[in-house]
Image (cartoon, rainbow, N blue to C red):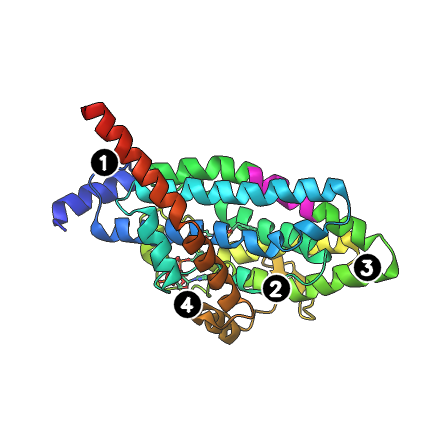
Amino acid sequence: DDPEKLAAFQARIDAGDKIEPKDWMPAGYRKTLIRQIGQHAHSEIVGQLPEGNWITRAPTLERKAILLAKVQDEAGHGLYLYCAAETLGVSRDELTEMLLDGRMKYSSIFSYPTLTWADMGAVGWLVDGAAIMNQVPLQRTSYGPYARSMVRICKEESFHQRQGFDIMMKMANGTEAQKRMAQDALNRFWYPSLMMFGPSDAESVHSEQSMAWKIKMNSNDELRQKFVDQTAPQAEYLGLTIPDETLAWNEEKGGYDFAEPDWSEFFDVLKGNGPCSVERIEARQKAWDDGAWVREARLAHAAKKRAAKVA
Ligand code: FAQ
């Protein structure tokens, strides 16, 4: 890229300008956005699977209606994000193919199973909680279409987080067996939730450049710390114990000290070795294959319309 153009671009970023699809942008900026927005979109779509697993087994009609609405919201988030990525010159088909052949990732958290109804509480409370912590600052990200898509997504994620906390409250204040289920869900989802923020700042390859371009507004460790600080008192309110004996308020830093997740497990999940990694991609592959006739029919319909217009 031309150094003068680069400097002018950086000056726009530093001044807080939004970059729009038709504006000049460095190739690396475009590439990073396609990667991050595309992976974010894939996460929303794959993220429907662990909760979709419980729709037919929700304990009441009301819980079922709420869970259905949440899972549908996630489909919507995926679709806005694919649209935002398309403004950068990549097609949805290409993005999907990259997910299916392993060139693109989705969030590690969705490679874990949802074993009990309490997991619906833990996913809403912790996973949506972590997602909001990461996404609220992204409303100010430098790429216009991404920033704008985050506004509605964050509103919906707040509802998701509250519904999860509500399930946890019911379970934690329920029978002994329900309380045990809630604690077990927290035990299993705690460290995978911490992993959602990505590797430590020292190990994060993209953070420095992404923060300079304001694609990311905070570092992985900063957001992870904020998440722990927000969540620890909530666990206490629920009467549940975070599975970390080292968790303690540190007056001096004004935040909690906490144990790092097992990073070797995280990198293993990224390689496709998570407990449900194979199952998740198989489900996406099946949906893609089963939907081929719909895509073909729509293309044929569009071609017919075009031909009719010409005639
Ligand atoms: N999982 O250099 P960094 C949701 C990869 S919320 C998998 O630090 P970066 C809502 C990373 O891609 C979840 N891979 O990377 C919902 C890179 O590999 P690459 C989605 C991860 O991009 C809730 C490598 O590690 N949210 O879906 C993960 O600067 C409930 C090095 O890492 C977003 O995507 C991970 N956890 O920072 C739905 C938010 N962490 O690409 C349903 C937007 C890192 O070079 C139910 N994304 N990697 O092959 C971001 O903010 C950033 O992309 C980070 C990672 C913070 C995730």
Q: Residues within 10 Å of mark 1 (few under 14, many from 20)?
A: few
**Which is nearer the N-term, disc 4 or disc 3?**
3
Determine if the magenta segment contains residue 40: no
Can the viewer see residue 136? no
Mark-to-mark CA distance, 4 and 3: 38 Å
C-alpha separation, residue under disc 2 versus residue under disc 1: 41 Å
**Callout 3 amino acid:** Lys
What are the residue bounds of the magenta stretch? 156-164
Report whether 235 appears left or right of 263: right
Q: Which residue is mark 4?
A: 202
**SS at mark 3 in the image:** helix
Q: Is 149 left, or right, of 97 in this rendering? A: right
Determine the quadrant in which ligand 1 lies: bottom left
Within-10-Å neighbours for mark 3: few <14, some 14–19, many 20+: many
Disc 1 residue type? Lys
Q: Which mark is residue 22?
A: 1
Real-space CA distance between mark 3 and mark 2, rounded to the nearest whole angstrom: 20 Å
Q: Is residue 291 above or below residue 148?
A: below
- Quick check: can you spot residue 21? yes
At horizontal 49% and vertical 73% (from top left) the residue drawn is: 273
- List x then y, in percent, for residue 11: 24, 41
Across and down, in percent, residue 143 comes to 33, 40
Task: Choose mark 2 or mark 1, whichever is in front.
Answer: 2
Quadrant of the rendered structure where residue 79 is?
A: top left
Instruction: Say which amino acid is labelled 4.
Output: Ala
N-term mark: 1 or 3: 1
What residue lies at 34% left-to-right and 45% top-to-bottom? 296
> Circles 1 and 3: CB distance less than 8 Å?
no
Tag of residue 113? 2
Name the residue type under label 2. Pro
Which badge, 3 or 2, comes first in the chain's sequence?
2
Residue tagged 3:
179
